Amino acid sequence: MAKKTILVVDDEKDIRTTIQEILEKEGYKVITAIGGDDCLEKLKKLNPDLILMDIMMPGTPVPIVVKRIKKPKISYLSVVKVSEAEKRDLMKQKNIVGFIPKPFEVEDLIEKVKKFIGD
Amino acid sequence: MLGIRVKFIFVILFLVFTLGLVLLFITLSFGSDIIKDYSYKYLLSETEKAGQIIQSQNILVEAHIDSLEIIAKEEFDYDVALQDKSYLKNKLIKISPFVKELLEEVHASHKAIISDYVTYSVEDFKDVYQVWYAFDNEKLTTPENEPISSYTSGNPDAQWYYGPKESGKPMWTEVYRDEITGVPMVSYVKPLYYLDGRFLGIVGMDLSLEGVTAYLESLSLPSESYAILLDQNNNYISNLSEKLNPELFKELRLDKGIFSDNIHTFAYFKLQNKQTIIIVSHNVDLFQRLNETTRNLIILTCIILIFSSFLGYFLFNPYIKGINQLSYVAEQMINKNFKARTDIHSKDELENLGNAFNKAMANLEVTEEERKQIDKAKTEFLSITSHELRSPMTPMIGQLQMILKNYFGKINTKQRESLEIVLNNTERLDKIIVDFLEISRIEAARLKFNFVKTNLTKTIYSVVKEMKEFMPEKKIKIDVKIEKLPIIEVDPDRVSQILRNLLTNAMKFTPENGKIEISAKIQNKMILFSVKDNGIGISEGEQRRLFEPFYQIDNMYQHKSGGTGLGLAIAKGIVESQNGRIWLTSQSNKGTSFYFTVPLKPVKEVKAIRLLFSNTEQSDEKIKELFKKYIGPLGEQEFETLKKSGVITYKLIKHYIFSLEKKGILSQDRTKEFKNEIAFILKGEKEAITDDNISEKDIKKFVITSKK
């Protein structure tokens, strides 16, 4: 079975590194992007199974970026509270599958990702 | 609301109406008199004028007769006189050319010197009359050959002869009709004398009254009015066709006057020769004029009033508009719409007021803009801070966990212990950061509430279920006693947060096998939650400081649960920014009960709550609580009133407390306790003892006891 691909979008290098290490250990293929614009660029060539997206990043605002991503599943990964995200209408799109708060427990992250896209 | 414009119109209409009534009243009551007066005056003056003209004619007549007076020097022989022209001339003195002609005619005719016709015209009327002499001589006869003496003697109709002869004075006769022509006539006659005073004869002038009548008819008088002339015996000289009752004119005493009966009004003027001219007019006619004039006056008044009211309205309209504008702008000010402006150009105080308003609004607009900017900056700051402070946590915790899970190779026990310490403290730091950010938000009124329709019963049970995992070894029983709660709009996460915090605290301070009771009910448009435990209780000193940030009662369970000391402060912030209240009651060794209220209807605007230590506010709060404690519910109000009177000093409060003791409101013991507690709060333990001579024992009551 082919490895499932996860695209991690976060402006902080350490977070990208940490998440990549955790998820690659679990057997996923991990691609990273440094922001919303970079994410859209990478999506022109890739088709990941899941996108983990931070909310507060410089560049094109995340709500606009998310509107342009129709196919892959997206889960937010942010310090922003889920209730706040709901208020900002970020959770409405159909391909948004979940919300992982930062900071997270390693186990928690793995569990949620497995729930979203399987092993 | 009845606008100022409408009220003003009412005022104007009322004033105008009142003024109109007053004017009308004056007009009608005095006006008619004035008009009547005026009409009367007019009639009277016309009468007088006409009278003067007739009078002047009469005077001319009299003057002429005067000029025809002759005096005889001596007796003369009429036979001789008839023969000799110069004879009479020598006998008579004061001869006028006219008499001379007469004498010549006498000679010619040998008849009595009677009659000649002279035409006079006086002003604008012609009258024909004759002038004659009548001498007292039997030899003389009338043209009809009748001896004059027989004609005149004993003839009552011969007033024209007897009158002046007996009175010795000239006079005007009554009116009579000419025998031949039938024309109404009146005569002016004068006696003549010899030098020695004996009666000689009469000279007279006969006036036809046609001229006078014509003149009187020619007068321009109001329609239906006419003029009449009466002689001295009230016989009609003129206008003999009209038959008025002569009785009316009997009592005319004054030289001139005016009087009315039911039908007519009479204006009269007495001439020098005792004739009277009267102008008669019909009352209807007079009053018709009066009514017409009154009606015209009323119309004129109405026009003036209407004009005045319009004028008044237009004069004041700018002020009404101005006031309306001011009112509108003031309303906009209240509604925080600072763009509205007034536009008043009345060049007076109103304009000043308008300009002041405009300036104020401009200032407010600027201030509002600034406030919005600051507000925006605050929000941005908090969200950036929050993000920046918490972001490092993710890689920190993540990497530590990964090492501990042997992601990078197996680690030894010592390494594990060490890393676990680091990880725990990282997690603890994160919690403190989260709590501190909450406090910042509470202080800046940036708390974000997510009000949704919630089934509170479910929420409570969910929290209770969660708490069952906390300190299971203590085997504490949690009872839920809640009334049927309606589904209301609240933020369930926040309510859970508070309950969680209270339950955590309760569980820490309740002994093993203890009991905690949670209840919720509706009270005064709020939901009252309570968490009651049967633990060790909290002393009064501790109670006061409980909600302070970072304050924690020493307890062996504190560190284990990793509390930050901010939980209650945050709970207080959450509750109070929604206009709720949080408080507790406690008894040593019996238990503690925490209460908090949440509004049934969510607040629209979140209040900023001061939590971080602020000297005055904190002590004010404490003192307020004391007031409530010793005086009762009114204590809060008493304290507020005291605050208004000046700065809160110990002296001020002490004075107040003692005044209560004097009034008998506080007992001696309570007064002492109240005073001591205030001293403790305001001055602190040590200073209270030294400055106020309060015994150590008394102060110790209030000091925080940290046992265990």
Image: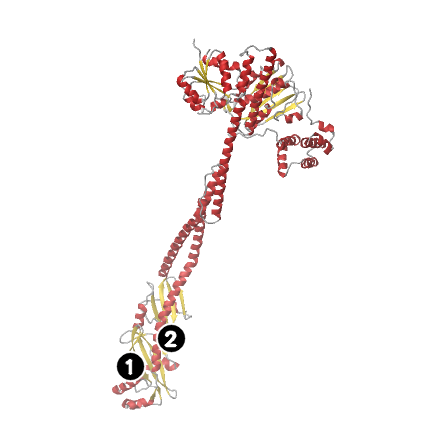
Q: Are marks 1 and 2 in contact (CB under 8 Å)?
A: no
Percent x, y for residue B684? 69, 30
Q: CA distance from mark 1 to mark 2?
A: 24 Å
B96 up-or-down from B310: above or below:
below
Q: Is residue A61 left or right of residue B160?
A: right
Any part of residue B35 in sight: yes
Q: Which residue is mark 2?
A: B273
Measured as percent of width and height from the top left, residue B26 is found at 44, 56
Does residue B112 appear anywhere in the picture? no
Residue displayed at 70% across by 27% down? B701
**Image height check: is B142 above or below B597?**
below
Q: Is residue B628 above or below residue B120?
A: above
Observer-nearest of B526 and B83: B526
Res. B257 image quadrant: bottom left
Residue underneath mark 1: B115
The picture places residue B11, in percent across and down from the top left corner, at 45, 48
- Residue at position x 52%, y 13% from top? A107
Secondary structure under badge 2? Answer: loop
**Tag 1, which chain?**
B
Amino acid type for the residue under numbered disc 2: Asn
- Which quarter of the rendering shows the C terminus of chain B? top right
Q: Using the image, name the chain to which the residue with label 2 belongs.
A: B
The extreme left residue here reads B108
Q: Tag 1: residue type?
A: Ser
The earlier-in-sequence mark between 1 and 2 is 1
Pointer 2: residues within 10 angstroms few (<14), some, or many (20+)?
some
SS of the residue under disc 1? loop
> Horizontal placement of B101 versus A93: left or right?
left
**Residue B167 drawn at (x, y percent):** 39, 81
